[in-house]
Amino acid sequence: MAPLFLAYGLVKGAYIGTEALSTVVMHVTKLVAYRGAEVLPMKSVVTGLAIGPFMIIGSRIGKRAIDRLPEQVFVLLIELTITAAGLLFLIRGR
């Protein structure tokens, strides 16, 4: 979704927020489906809930760092990350 969000003009907080919301919707949908099919153990759900507060803290720290970045640097970092991920997929074949 990153290229779409960047092409739409979302940067910094708007980009991160939109990416986070789409990720939450996707994972909640998966959680409901996997629990309904009884392929997700309750232990995994509890573990996920336990790490939630740490993810919130990390998001707050990350937002402070992102707010300090110029928009062009933010876009460059996202594009470099996407490029690196694509190269790894090509190299590893997965």
Image: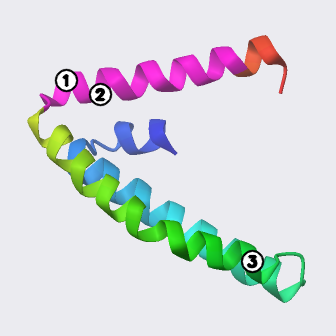
From the image, give the main secondary structure of the stretch colored magenta.
helix
Tell me the residue that label 1 is attached to. Answer: 72
Left or right: 94, with 14 as reference point: right
Residue at 46% x, 35% y is: 3
Label 2: which residue?
Answer: 75
Q: Say if 50 sits above or below 23 in the image.
A: below
Spatial CA distance of label 1 from label 2 is 5 Å
Label 3, label 1: how far apart the Cα atoms are: 42 Å
Q: Position of residue 49 (x, y in %)?
A: 55, 76
- Could you tell me the amino acid type at mark 3? Lys
Q: Is 9 in front, or is 44? A: 44
- In the shown orientation, is residue 83 left or right of residue 30? left
Tell me where residue 78 appears, x and y as whole percent.
Answer: 39, 29
Q: Secondary structure at mark 1?
A: helix
- Residues in magenta, as a range: 69-88
Q: Amino acid at mark 1?
A: Gln
Is 60 within the magenta? no
Identify whether 71 is placed above or below 1: above
